[in-house]
Every structure is written in structure tokens, then in C-alpha cells.
Image (spheres, coloured by chain):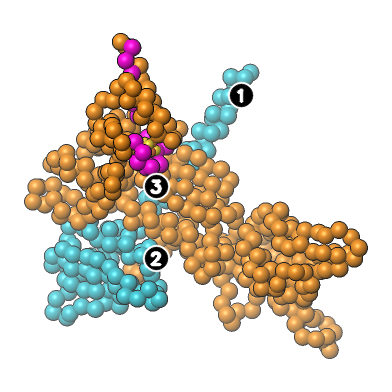
Amino acid sequence: MPKKGTKSKKAVDDVPDQQENKLPDYLELQRTRVVCNADAPIHTQGFQYSGAFAAMGVDNSVSVEKFCKNFKIDIKRLTEDDMEFDMIGVDASIANAFRRILIAEVPTMAIEKIFMADNTSVIADEVLSHRLGLIPLDADPRLFDYISENDVPNERNTIVFKLHVSCEKGSQRITVKSGELEWLPEGSQLSMASPAQSGDKQKTFTSFSQSQKEILEKPLGVKFKDITIARLGPGQAIELEAHAVKGVGKVHAKWSPVATAWYRMLPEVVILEQIEGEEAEELVKKCPVNVFDIEDLGNGGKRAVVAKPRACTLCRECVMGPCGEKIQLRRVRDHFIYTIESTGALPPEVLFTEAVKILEEKCERVISELS
Amino acid sequence: MEHGSLEDSSASTFSIMEEDHTLANSVRFVLNQDPRVAFCGYSIPHPSENKVNIRVQTTGDPAKDVLKDSLQDLMVMCQHIRGTFDTAVADFRGNKLADAMDIDLNKK
Ligand code: SF4
């Protein structure tokens, strides 16, 4: 938990000195904060150019050493499938790169091909296929290769599932859940051509040379067994085979490893002028997320203080109305509250490390292309 | 691919295929922090083309070297981020374990 109330009292000039020659306060504020006024935010751009303050003898450049010294990560919450952490001392462009990579470029496994043998349910083949594609699979994508158009599906690039359900005539309607997808570690069971003449081994849609059970440590399956796929009425049946392959979110969202990944800048609520008595009570009531609190002054008076600025949603309720001038809402430019919600294939902390690795790979690729 | 002039290597546009804002914006940030850079920016000429153009103008050094250094710097930053993150996760897990043990001890 963040220490309550410490952040808010911090004035801008408490920020660790990054230069020997200090900037005047108002410029330092512009450089490190976005100020959210009642009408619109100001100083949203920041100063990126290294020579922005050259005329004042202030160096605005950031060397790698300086970056490494100031960079901090503070984990707030970490569970099996979601996490929240503070990333401090990094520019929005880099924080955003990780977000973009998490959503669109970290690979996962998802069902891509459906071989429909029978579908007499009310749900159309293509809709059913789409629903199957979106089911998160509990398979580590790092153990698999990408499959390209001319590749033969094998045990290293394809996961095969079977779904065979039917509802008997005269019985109740049934619901088909994702848990009924059965993993076929030996590969496809559907034969490709009509009855093979030479009897020995039938040609199927995959050519596994060994069972996936031998190359994987744990059995594969779906992450959640209770996702409704279809409903079957009496006499209806579904029989199909689903082939899952490795892919990335920019091709189709079903491969996105995160439900979503987002960040927000750390809010900072500053009381510029003391707010007392009635007005303070009013202010506390006004904030929907209880950012403010009342502090009793010795003589029976009351004063508003900022108790939990982190909760601020920037609704700007407090800066509108009578005492609006006395409050300033700010955001710390280089402090990001990052949230990652995994869909289940990989835990969130692994996803983030993978995302950082992907950015590294991108750099490496371009460097080698340039030389 | 680099587009520049033969006589003056200090200003060039680099066309990078199969990349987008993800890399270009990060590199632009790192380039901007480099005192050798006089100007830099990037553009995506057409949204349906997977390509970015990164423009680098320096105060004298070859643009290509400066860009390469920036990419190198970005890589080092990423490695540092990864390292810090892993330590933070390990610490967080460690603390949680310690907390759990504390509670057990207090309960007796
Ligand atoms: S902007 Fe909204 S949430 Fe934030 S402190 Fe003001 S009233 Fe509360």
C-alpha cells in the first residue's frame, strides 16, 4: 500500500535534483507535471529535446546511466492473472511501447482452424468457429513455433482439440461448455482422403512424429472450463476438430495475451490555499472516491487534507465550483500506474518480461539491418 | 534503408519496414535525449503500409551511428527495466511470504 498522504504534500521542488543548475519552479512544474485545469489539461507535451534549456545552462538530456539510476518499479498487486505496479522514471513513449507490445505482439496459442464434421445445432458453423477461436488456452506459447502457410502441422506448431457432443432425442436441452474440448496429444484423428486403400496408416490433417505428452511437461487444455460454446436441443450434435496455432494480437485479437493492459499517470492533488470549516466538509463530500479527508485543528476548526491522491479519477469535480481555485490537480509525468490483466496463458509478470524482450529484439533487428 | 546524401552524412531518413509507433516513438524519445541530435522525428507515410520513416539530423556526427547508438541505448534501458522488474517481483513474493509467516507467528 502507498503511504497515505505523503505524496500529496510533496511540492514540485522535492523531486530529486536531476541537474546541477536548477530550473525555476514554474518550468520544473511544466517539465515534470501535467496540470489538469477545470477546462483542459495544460503542459501535456513536456520537454523532450535534450537542448530545451540550453540557454539557461540546464542540461535536459538523459543518459543511460542517469536513467538506470532513477528508474524504479514497485509492485502493488500480483495475482495469478492480474497485476498492478508503479513504473517510475520512464517516458510515456516507452511505457506506451510496452503496452502496445503486450496487446498486439506477445504471442499466444489460439484455435485457428476448425474441421467441422457435423453441426446440427442452431449456431452457424462460422459463428461457432469464431467462438471457439476466442477461448483462452492454457498452453505456454514459448514451447511452440509459428506455423507458416506451407508448413505441415506437427507437434511443435499445432495443438489439436476434439469436440464431440450430442444431445439425445427425448432428453433435455444441453449446454456445451469449453471444458468439453478434448486435447488430442497424438494429433488429428480425422482422415484426409476418403478410405485409404493401403490400409497401414491413414493420412490425417496433422503429421505428429511423437506425442505432445512427451515434449510438454503438463497436459494442455482450456484455461476456463465453464465458457458456454453452444446449446444443443434433442437430436442435435456437434462433431469437430479444432487446431490451435501460435499467433499475435495484431493479426487477430484472439491471440492477444491480455484482457487489457493499461497505465495511468500518478495523480497528485495539491491544496494551494487552506480550505477550512464548512467549505472543507463540502469538499470531502464532493469527491466521489474520497480523496480528501478532514483534519481537526486544535481549536475546534476543521481543515481539508489530501488523504489518498492515488484514488483520484480526475473527474474534476473538486476544481469546479466555489473552492476550485484553491486546488490543483496534477499528474506526475514519469510515474505510471501500470495494470496488466492476463487472459490466462501466461502469468502477468511473465507477459511483461516477454514484452520488454520483444522491444529489445526489435532494436536488435534494426541495428543489424543498419550495419 | 537509409536515404541521405553522399556528401553530408549528418542528416538522413531511415525507412524501417515492419515497424510502427511502438519502436519509432521509443527511438524518437531516446534520440531526442542525445545531445548530438539537432532534430529527429518519425512518420508513418500510409497507415496500411507497415513502414516508418525516422528522420535524424545531427550536429555533425553521422546520422546512422547516432541512430545505432540510440537503439543500443534503448536496448540497455530495456535490459535494465527487465532486471529491475524481476527483482521487484522476487521481492514482492518474498515479502508476501515473510508477511504470511509473521501472521502465523503472531497467531501462535
Ligand atoms: S478530480 Fe474528482 S476524484 Fe480527483 S480529487 Fe477531485 S473530486 Fe476527487
Q: Which chain is cyan?
A: B
Q: Determine the CA span between mark 2 and mark 3.
A: 25 Å
Q: Amino acid at mark 1?
A: Asp
Q: Position of residue B69 (x, y in %)?
A: 26, 62
Q: Is residue B63 magenta?
A: no
Between label 1 and label 3, give the one nearer the viewer. 3
Query: Which of the 4 quarters of the picture holds residue A286?
Result: top left
Residue A123 spot, x, y in % from top left: 72, 69
Q: Which residue is mark 2?
A: A362
Q: CA distance from mark 1 to mark 3?
A: 36 Å
Nearer-the-camera pick, A296 or A321: A321
Q: Is residue A370 visible?
A: no
Residue A363 percent coordinates (x, y): 36, 64
Secondary structure at badge 3 equals strand
Q: Nearer the viewer, residue B82 or A91?
A: A91
Instruction: Say which chain tag 2 marks.
Output: A
Q: CA distance from mark 1 to mark 2?
A: 47 Å
Whether pointer 1 and pointer 3 mark residues with C-beta atoms closer than 8 Å, the reply is no
Amino acid type of disc 2? Answer: Lys
Q: Which residues are magenta?
A: A300-318
